[in-house]
Amino acid sequence: MKNRFALLLFLGLAGIYLTTCLIAPKDIFAVEHDIVLNADAEKLFNQVNNIEHWPIWNDWLIDANDDALTFSRNIVGKGALLQFDLVTGSGELEIIKSERNRLVQTRTFFKNWSGTVHSKYTFEPVGQNKTRVKLKVNNSDNTNFLVRGILYLNKAQQNIEQNTLSALKNLESESKKQQGLH
C-alpha cells in the first residue's frame, strides 16, 4: 500500500512538473532596467567593457573563487571571454559587441542547462557625472525543456530583476571609485 501511494505521489508530481514545463514560456525571463546612475558614462562603460571587472560588480560573480574564473588573453571589448565554473553552473560569458562609451552586448552560455542569456547595456550621458543606463537581459529560445520548468518554478524573472538592479548599483559604486568620488 505504501509503495503504491509513493508511486502515485511520484507520478502526480512528475505530471505536474511536466505540465509546468509545457506551459512555461520559452522566454522564461526578459528583464529591462532604465536607470540614471550618478557616474560618468565612460567609467561605467569601462567597467562593463572589461571582463576582468565583472566579478567586482556583477552579483552572480562577486562571490566566485578566483580559481572558478578563467579570463581570455583579450579582456577588453569584443571577443573578451570569461569562463566560469560556479555552484550555479558552468559556461562562458563573452562580449559580442562593443561601441566605445555607448554599448556593450554579451552572450552567456550555461553548459549545464544548454541555455544562453543575452545582455545589452547602453550608456547615455544625461548631465555632469550622470548616465542613463539601459540594460536588457533575456534568455534564448534554446533553453532545455526541463530546465525551463525549473527556471519558471524558481521565479527566474523576479530573481534576475533583483540581481541585475543590484549589479547596476554596484556598477555605479565601482565607477565612482574610479572617478575618486566615493
Image (tube, rainbow, N blue to C red):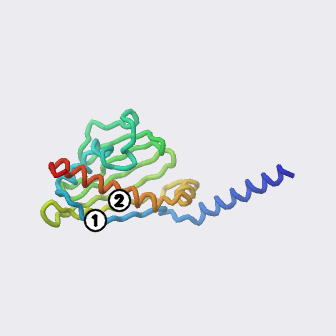
Give the class, few, some or many, for how many residues have Cα within 10 Å of label 2's Cα (few <14, many ≥20).
Answer: some
**Foreground residue, 110 or 178?**
178
Q: Mark 1 points at which residue?
A: 35
Residue that appears at 27% across and 53% down: 171
Q: Mark 1: which secondary structure?
A: strand
Quadrant of residue 121 in the image?
Answer: bottom left
**What amino acid is at disc 1?**
Ile
Q: Mark 2 points at which residue?
A: 165
The residue that appears at 61% across and 62% down in the rendered structure is: 20
* Residue at the spot 69% in from the left edge and 60% down from the top edge: 15
Nearer the observer, 49 or 161: 161
- Which residue is pictured at 47% across the width and 52% down the height? 115
In this rendering, would 174 be left or right of 150?
Answer: left
Q: Earlier in the sequence, mark 1 or mark 2?
A: 1
Disc 1 and disc 2 in contact, CB within 8 angstroms: yes
Provide residue 164's location: percent of width, then percent of height.
36, 57
Q: Is residue 99 placed above or below 84 in the rendered structure? A: below
- Residue 21 x, y percent position in the rendering: 59, 60
The local crowd at label 1, few if under 14, some if 14 to 19, many if 20 or more residues have their Cα within 10 Å, is some
Give, as a three-letter code, the residue at label 2: Leu
Q: Residue furthest top?
A: 67
